[in-house]
Image (cartoon, grey):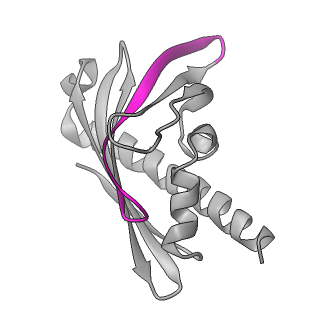
Amino acid sequence: MPENSIVIDAPPGAVWEVLADGWLFPLWVVGACRIRDVEPSWPAAGSRIHHSVGVWPGVIDDDTEVLASEEATALRLRARAWPMGEAEVLITVAPSGRQSEVTIVEEVVSGPGRLVPAVVMGIGISWRNKETLRRLELLVEGRAARSV
């Protein structure tokens, strides 16, 4: 399972504000291109974001469900993009002084993606999640700078 981490110059609460706003999802998640709906209880366990993935005109409508949520600490998701498959994603946020260390661990759990050799899949997921964390960092730090 590929694991990526980044240190963000903002406290865990600021990171959580972005994670908890489902409408911001396509701004930081690589591959998500639009949000069709966010259930009002997001990011509570069982809630979903209804999103599209891909590049127009080849977009796929699907959803991401919260499997577990600990405010400002952890978010476990099941991301769907059928017919490609599903992945479980764990995002953790840990305080590091006045900063936050954010880690993403992702594993393909069903669908044709499981047929791709683990080494090859790991390289692709790691690259994507590195950029996802970079986008999250820019979004969180940009919002934090505006609130000062």
Residue 123 shown in magenta:
no
Residue at horizontal 59 percent and vertical 77 percent from the top: 9
**Direction from residue 26 to residue 147 in the image, left or right:** right
Residue 18 in the image: x percent, y percent? 58, 54
Q: Is residue 34 above or below residue 61?
A: below
Residue 79 lies in quadrant: top left
Residue at horizontal 51 percent and vertical 52 percent from the top: 19
Residue at horizontal 20 percent and vertical 32 percent from the top: 117
Residue 113 lies in quadrant: top left
**Direction from residue 20 to residue 82 in the image, left or right:** left
Count of numbered marks: 0
Main SS of the magenta segment? strand
Pick the residue in front: 76 or 104. Answer: 76
Residue 65 visible in this rendered orientation of the protein: yes
For this orientation, the residue located farthest to the bottom is 97
Pick the residue in front: 126 or 44. Answer: 44
Residue at horizontal 75 percent and vertical 73 percent from the top: 145
Q: Is residue 31 above or below residue 125?
A: above
* The C terminus sits in image quarter: bottom right
Q: What range of the chain is rendered magenta?
A: 56-74
Residue 60 in the image: x percent, y percent? 51, 14
Residue 92 in the image: x percent, y percent? 35, 61
Residue 116 visible in this rendered orientation of the protein: no
**Direction from residue 69 to residue 23 in the image, left or right:** right
Q: Is residue 14 above or below residue 134?
A: below
Pick the residue in front: 124 or 89. Answer: 89
Residue 136 lies in quadrant: bottom right
Q: Is residue 13 above or below residue 16?
A: below
Pick the residue in front: 2 or 146. Answer: 146
Residue 72 shown in magenta:
yes
